[in-house]
Amino acid sequence: MADDYGILRRTAELATEYLRSLPERPVKSGMAAAELRRELITALPAAGEEPQAVIEHLAEVGGRAAVAMAGPRYFGFVIGGALPPALAADWLTSSWDQNAGLYAGGPAASVVEEAVGAWLLELFGLPPASGFGLVTGCQMAHFTCLAAARTAVLERAGWDVTGRGLFGAPEVEVVVGDEAHSTVLSALQYLGLGRDRVHTVATDSQGRIRLRELEKVLARIPHRDPLIVNLQAGNVNTGSFDPICAAIDLVRRREGAWVHVDGAFGLWAAVSPQLRPLLDGVELADSWATDAHKWLNVPYDSGLAFVADADAHVKAMAPPHASYLEYGQERDEVSWVPEFSRRARGFPIYAALRTLGRDGVREMVEHCCALARHMAAQLGQVDGVEILNDVVLNQVLVRFIPRGDGNISGARGDDFTHDVVRRVQEDGTLWLSGTTWHAMAAMRISVSNWSTTLEDADRSVEAILRCAGR
């Protein structure tokens, strides 16, 4: 039996070697798909292979193929790295192997999630009696919050959607900005509310909803119709924030309306006194969705759903009773999330918050924002490089113009910007993504990693400019 567990020590060594390589390794994957298939896809052996040989092979191939998302120069898709204490807690989570759907299956997991829920509600400045659930990511956080919204607005219209479903129910009207993230629309799709029948509100040059347009949209919806309005805290391209407080004031003129806030990464601005004004009035909403695997820098997966009306939250999520299950007086996570069998996600968050403290979380968020401003300033002073957004958070949008072409919105600029993004990705010094912003190609830089330094930022700017021929 001792030999069976010896493989764990060797695996920890291999994992640590990989982590120590992150600051200097190329950020791009080191293996093509065809090579990966040759290495990993084989006939299933009749007799089992030696365990350490399998793990050594996985570590070698998987490590070479891995994109260094956890490293300090990964600037794609608003992805943080794993803080060492959070990763260590995640290792323990796998070792304990608790099914954390019920308190009976994971007592410590349940109580730890009570702790992190209370801590996070306090950090974000949300109503302390709110319901909360730890889910896979912001996609399922939206699903959870909007399920509670659907339950509540239909109940106010005299319809029990939990028991009767949507057949014959009053139609629920949903309002989103035209820069709403696709995961919000997917959640509406999953919930039977439809992703194509939403009312969209025009946005400004930074992706913020226009209040006058919101007012017009609301005026077209009959007052008797159940209503859900989605607001955005942190545009995925620009980092901009809807005018949350004023928008909620408009929505509250409609009795029984529900306001949901997509704060996938922007909700973390609440931890910083200098950034908190961007979220003015956010606590007045009805539900909020965010990610811990973004700015709290815990391992995947770790989404967070908060619902002010805890009763509506439970009604939407709690399963029907099964006779063989032991429900008790303690917190059963299955009552707050879409999953029954689930990972004990609270331990990495608990470790991260205890080791960082309130000040550490604030410093991490402010540090990333400062680096984003620094990178934007360095890039923006170079001829032929345009910063397209107001850098209010950790997002930078960059456009490249070919020499001799003064047309920032022209097709040549699109082609050239796409080419620069491709070159940067292939160079391997850093990794970032391309995007389309207001019909223009752009480079998108997201600074979210705890380990990114000023030296990493400068090294990345140098590589970007080199790839752009500047």
Image (cartoon, rainbow, N blue to C red):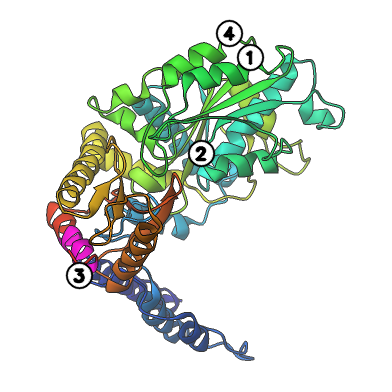
| Amino acid type of the residue that numbered disc 4 sits on in the rendered structure | Arg
Tag shown at residue 219: 1
Question: What residue is pinned by disc 4?
Answer: 253
1 or 4: tag closer to the N-terminus: 1
Dot 2: within a 10 Å radius of its alpha carbon, few (fewer than 14), some, or many (20 or more) residues? many
Q: Give the range drawn in magenta.
A: 459-467
Question: What residue is pinned by disc 3?
Answer: 24
Secondary structure of the residue carrying tag 2 is helix
Q: Distance between the residues labelled 1 and 2?
A: 44 Å
Spot occupied by residue 443 in the image (x, y as percentages of width and height): 34, 55
| Amino acid type of the residue that numbered disc 1 sits on in the rendered structure | Ala
Spot occupied by residue 192 in the image (x, y as percentages of width and height): 74, 38
**Secondary structure that dominates the magenta span:** helix
Q: Which residue lies furthest to the right in this view?
A: 168
Q: Mark 4 or mark 2, which is nearer to you?
A: 4
* Nearer-the-camera pick, 125 or 24: 24
Query: In this rendering, does residue 385 appear at all?
Result: yes
Q: Which residue is drawn at 28% across and 56% down?
A: 400
* Nearer-the-camera pick, 317 or 213: 213
Q: In this view, does 260 lie to the left or right of 266?
A: right
1 or 2: tag closer to the N-terminus: 2
Whether pointer 4 and pointer 3 mark residues with C-beta atoms closer than 8 Å, the reply is no
Q: Which residue is drawn at 64% across and 26% down?
A: 149
Spot occupied by residue 456 in the image (x, y as percentages of width and height): 17, 58
| Amino acid type of the residue that numbered disc 3 sits on in the rendered structure | Glu
Dot 4: within a 10 Å radius of its alpha carbon, few (fewer than 14), some, or many (20 or more) residues? few
